[in-house]
Amino acid sequence: MSILTWLEPADDDTVAETLAQSFRQRFGVAPDGVWAAPGRVNLIGEHTDYNGGFALPLALPHRTYAAVRLRDDGVLRIASAQQPSSWEGRVEEVGPGRPQGWPAYVAGVVWALADRLPDGLGLDVLVDGHVPLGAGLSSSAALSCSVGVAVRDLVRGLAGLSDADLAAACVRAENEVAGAATGGMDQTVSLRAVDEHLLLIDARDHSVLPVAWTLPGHEVLVVDTRAHHSLADGQYAARRDTCERAATALGMGSLRELDPGRLEDADVRRALADVPDGMARVRHVVTENGRVLDLVGALQEQDAVLVGSLMTGSHESLRDDYEVSCRELDVAVTAALGAGALGARMTGGGFGGSAIALVDREDVELVAGAVAEAFADEGLTEPHFLEAAPSRPAGRVAPRPTG
Ligand code: ADP
Ligand code: MG
């Protein structure tokens, strides 16, 4: 069998040291410090955020690192170890669509915080990402949040800015400056995660509740399928639109308000008859919210079998009712289950990205091997693997915080 590719998290101190050195070489001065923010994986609760529902993500041990130095001349200089292109400009030049490309995720944070920042503030930023880019594990939020926490730490007037307000600023950077649709889950978990916990997020009021990971004998195995289907953006917009129309047809502000017990009612069916695919999409959203809460209960009971079956139920609902899965995700899920995973599902928006499986710690290599073999048999690109131990939120890495 071929050798599997595992994406390991980086060691904070090692990255901080080499990144500070590269920063000095590039910019000719030392950074004020190095900060890091995690990517995330969503255990369950997919396509629920824009319906006022629940999600249950965890912060990955894989983080994006940002070496940052404040300037007082209004200049921004932005570079990345992962990208050949860099950007230099003035803070006043930043706005929707400017700069283009990846530097927007960095410059956008300064833009979103602008009215709280002192005049003339500028930044030198060099980032090094250890979250795979475009794998559905939120390297984009890890990038903007790593810069967000740096700016909050360095600017005296921002000391009182809450994690929730900083998350909102990072969402605006991504939505408005980078022009990428994001519902806010990614930034919330990157900034507000609790080590060794999942984060139950209620999209209705943005409240969060840490939920302990109670299955130490089990792991969440992540399969980065390395597939990115061009359908993703248009289909995401179409699903959002259908949900909005369904809620309107039901006379509700959001699908969160629909009682699961009413799904089969004649008046609900009648109201949704004129919304193409409305019934199936609504069934996914409503049952998915139920599965999130059931999974929280199953974790409290340390019932790994139930956790797994809820994950698999989520996948079936996303595949059959919401129709956002794809061949690579289905192959990963089927192969993982066939090799003994307790449950498996696609995670993220769909049409590529990553799948996850709940696996007995001793079976991790075996299950990953079975997935890799299934991909090879199907002629698919070799997948990559990560272990998703629920980890800590964004913060400063160097100089090490005291106390
Ligand atoms: P995901 O967030 O799932 O990884 P996105 O498409 O939302 O996928 O975000 C990926 C984009 O974020 C990249 O194409 C790039 O523009 C930007 N990005 C993420 N990490 C880095 C990095 N370390 N350096 C430069 N750009 C990055
Ligand atoms: Mg993203």
Image (cartoon, helix red, strand yellow):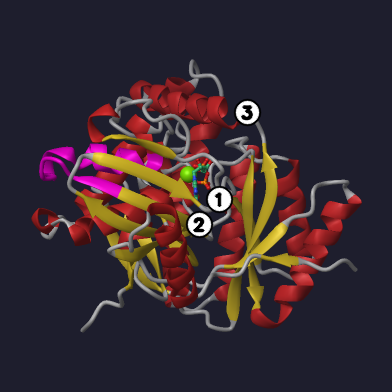
Q: Which mark is residue 51?
A: none
Q: Are marks 2 and 1 in contact (CB under 8 Å)?
A: yes
Give amino acid for label 3: Leu
Whether residue 65 is visible here, answered yes or no, is: no
Q: Which residue is mark 3?
A: 231
Q: Is residue 275 left or right of residue 218?
A: left
> SS at mark 2?
strand
Residue drawn at (35%, 31%) of the image = 177
Bin the neighbour count of mark 3 within 10 Å (Cα to Cα): few under 14, some 14-19, many 20 and up.
few
Q: Is residue 277 magenta?
A: no
Q: Is residue 363 left or right of residue 291?
A: right
Q: Is residue 113 magenta?
A: yes
Give amino acid for label 2: Gly
Q: Which residue is mark 2?
A: 129
Residue 368, percent across and down?
75, 67
User: Is ligand 1 less than 8 Å from the beta carbon at label 2?
Assistant: yes
Q: Earlier in the sequence, mark 2 or mark 1?
A: 1
Q: Which residues are magenta?
A: 105-123
Residue drawn at (42%, 51%) of the image = 143
Q: Nearer the viewer, mark 2 or mark 1?
A: 1
Bin the neighbour count of mark 2 within 10 Å (Cα to Cα): few under 14, some 14-19, many 20 and up.
many
Residue 131, percent across and down?
53, 57
Q: Which residue is mark 1?
A: 82
In-front residue for pair 349/247: 349
